[in-house]
């Protein structure tokens, strides 16, 4: 099974033995399958709101289950990611298409090692904001890791994450097919302050500089309208220009 650069980078960031990993907005399920195949994680729950995708994924997991470690456990669920529940108990090793969701391990509040990793990837920042805002109505302050990879609106997402009290544990920038993807591992209880432009994203590489230039061009184009409601966009442009001047200013 060959993963693209973005999915491979996400799978490599799953390097702690979480009790359960949630592959949300899972689509084809390649990321969750790779995580199980690596052997460190024993249970992956695949979640997507599209019934056809979940049906197809369930059949694929059954078909290729012999390629996974013998102790692998997985479930597929068709539901709104924002409504997943982290408290109840269910029988493991099954697959379902259901609106009732529960898992094997209770949510953990106070230990250093999170029991759960929730991955949300391949969707826009606005949708990611809606999902996380909904989840934090029930799980704010819990020791849960989130691994995020938005396809756009990263500045707005980062502002929301800061407002929600998230901290940064790890991040990286992946350039694939001339597009940049910001991967963030975050937690409300552990980590360092989260930056709106990225604490550790930027390397002295041409493609990183090009990605930053694209962000600046995007916000410059938006700000030409000079509308009053563009406060966030003007702030984003200012912050990205400052970052560019600090990191990539030619001597």
Image (cartoon, rainbow, N blue to C red):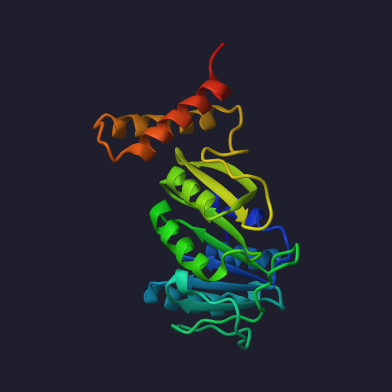
- Using the image as rendered, state which of residue 149 and residue 28 is in the foreground: 149
66 relative position to 98: left or right: right
Place of residue 220 in the rendered image (x, y in percent of width and height, measured from the top left):
34, 29
x and y percent of residue 194 in the render?
59, 45
Residue depicted at x 47% and y 33% = 211
Q: Quadrant of residue 27?
A: bottom left
Residue that lies at the very extreme toward the right in this rendered image: 112
Residue that protrudes farthest toward the top in the picture: 251
Query: Is 167 in front, or is 4?
Result: 167
The quadrant of the rendering that contains the N terminus is bottom right
**Residue 10 in picture, x, y percent from top left:** 59, 54
Counting every numbered tag in the picture gives 0
Q: What residue lies at 54% left-to-right and 55% top-to-bottom?
A: 148
Q: Is residue 54 above or below residue 195?
A: below
Whether residue 171 is visible: yes
Using the rendered view, name the quadrant where residue 126 is placed. Answer: bottom left
Q: Is residue 27 left or right of residue 148?
A: left
Q: Is residue 91 above or below residue 250?
A: below
Q: Position of residue 160 (x, y in %)?
A: 47, 51
User: Residue placed farthest to the bottom in the image?
Assistant: 91
Name above or below for residue 74 compared with residue 160: below
Q: Quadrant of the C terminus?
A: top right
Q: Residue 18, relative to residue 233: is it above or below? A: below
- Relative to the observer, which residue lies in front, 131 or 90? 131
Using the rendered image of the protein, determine whether residue 3 is visible from the camera's viewpoint. no
Closer to us: 134 or 178? 134
Residue drawn at the location 56% of the way across and 48% of the way down = 183
């Amino acid at each position: 099974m060959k993963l693209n650069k973005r999915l491979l980078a996400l799978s490599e960031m799953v390097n702690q033995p979480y009790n359960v990993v949630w592959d949300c907005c899972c689509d084809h399920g390649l990321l969750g399958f790779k995580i199980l195949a690596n052997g460190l994680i024993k249970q992956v729950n695949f979640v997507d709101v599209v019934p056809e995708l979940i049906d197809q994924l369930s059949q694929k997991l059954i078909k290729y289950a012999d390629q996974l470690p013998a102790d692998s456990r997985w479930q597929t669920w068709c539901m709104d990611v924002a409504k997943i529940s982290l408290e109840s108990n269910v029988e493991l090793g099954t697959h379902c298409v259901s609106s009732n969701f529960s898992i094997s391990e209770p949510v953990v509040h106070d230990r250093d090692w999170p029991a759960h990793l929730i991955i949300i990837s391949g969707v826009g920042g606005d949708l990611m904001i809606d999902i996380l805002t909904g989840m934090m109505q029930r799980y704010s302050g819990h020791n849960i890791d989130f691994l995020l990879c938005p396809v756009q609106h990263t500045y707005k997402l980062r502002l929301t994450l800061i407002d929600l009290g998230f901290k940064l544990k790890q991040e990286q920038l992946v350039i694939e097919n001339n597009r940049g993807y910001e991967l963030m591992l975050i937690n409300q209880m552990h980590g360092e302050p989260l930056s709106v432009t990225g604490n550790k994203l930027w390397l002295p590489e041409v493609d990183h500089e090009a990605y930053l230039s694209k962000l600046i061009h995007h916000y410059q184009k938006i700000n030409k309208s000079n509308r009053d409601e563009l406060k966030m966009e003007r702030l984003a442009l200012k912050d990205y220009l400052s970052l560019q001047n600090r990191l990539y200013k030619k001597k």
